[in-house]
Image: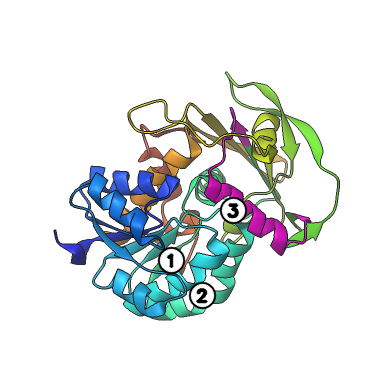
Amino acid sequence: MNERAAVVVYGATGHTGRFVLAELRGRGLTAVASGRDAERLAALAAEWPGVAVRPAAVDDPDALDRALAGAAAVINCAGPFAVTAGPLVEAALRAGIPYLDVAAEIEANAAMFADHAQAARAAGVPVVPAMAFYGGLGDLLVTAAMGDWTAADTVDVAYGLSDWHPTEGTRAAGRVSHERRGGRRVRYADGALRYHDDAVRQAQWDFPEPLGRRAVVAEFTMADVVTVPSHLAVPEVRTHMAVEAARDLAGADTPAPEAVDGLGRSAQTFVVDVRVRAGGVERRATARGQDIYAVTAPLVVEAVQRVLAGRTRTTGVASAGAMFGAAEFLRALAPHVTVDLPA
């Protein structure tokens, strides 16, 4: 195996990491599994012959350098990203290779733009945070809906999840975010992230059929509030979550995802409904699919393939919508994602 042309998957033994590893292999790309747990990596290598493993702790720069040596790119799937993203992107920049992650943590994504943009730009290395269901997919949909608009008044992203069985990684990241915010909630308004203690509020959202009108938790804020305004002139970005999914996430006894097909996907389905408004005109874009964790794999692997092929619009730290042609990227996700975009 030619590990020099490999994509390193950090956090490969995790729930999302395994989907990403399988997607890379399914597309004929060489993958190297890395992460913090050498025993779990060894077990993964025994399960998937031909996959090389390179254990590395995030607080060991030399080990990270060895893990990325000669690789073509690195995909970080290991949360909490407040802990892993900084050391891994710094290692990627030392190696001179592209870095992508699947972080849904708002503060970790904001820190990526704030702390590493200058170094990534100077190195001429693409860095794409939040290249996942949360942050990446919404950003691509908003960018495609904007089309020829250079600015908008508001952006709303509504998540119609049938349910949400969180992984342990999701729960760990949520705990870190909760602690960093001191229990406060966050929104993006008046052109800035703002923390608040307002009461949780429900609203009604008219999703496309067959989902229809559903109750949502209004301003259930996700990573789109970082990715969208990072490159689009929008002073207010709001995200909303189906009440059923929010209750599942909050439930201490909600079980982890359970596979129902040969691809390892759960039965969970989703509709992401985006509405962009400017000057009294509304544009809408939607995406449908199955299993938010599984669908992250084609999102980030499609992205890494485009980065390695030079099919990018910029360099340095950039969101999905800034790095790639949004509408064409979204259509390339079929059959994993079905999209309905403005003409």
Q: Circle 3 sits in a helix, a strand or a loop, which is it?
A: helix
- Label 2: which residue? 116
Q: Is residue 320 above or below residue 241?
A: below
Element under label 1? strand
Picture layout, residue 290 above or below residue 27: above
Q: Are marks 1 and 2 in contact (CB under 8 Å)?
A: yes
The circle drawn on residue 127 is: 1
Residue denoted by label 3? 172
Q: Is the residue marked by circle 2 packed among few (<14), some (14-19), or many (20+) residues within 10 Å?
A: some
Residue span colored magenta: 159-185
Whether residues under marks 3 and 2 lie with C-beta atoms below 8 angstroms apart, the answer is: no
Q: Position of residue 232 (x, y in %)?
A: 59, 58
Residue 175: numbered disc = none
Q: Residue 128 placed where, x, y %?
A: 45, 61
Pick the residue in front: 117 or 100. 100
* Front position among marks 3 and 1: 3
Q: Nearer the viewer, residue 14 or 216?
A: 14
The amino acid beneath tag 2 is: His
- Kind of residue at disc 1: Val
**Which residue reaches farthest left?**
1
Q: Amino acid at mark 3?
A: Ala
Calculate the distance from the C-alpha at mark 1 to the C-alpha at mark 2.
Answer: 9 Å
| Residue at screen point 46% across, 80% down | 119
Q: Quadrant of residue 316?
A: bottom left
User: Which dot, 3 or 2, sits closer to the camera?
Assistant: 3
Residue farthest toward the top in the current orientation of the protein: 210
Residue 59 falls left or right of residue 123: right
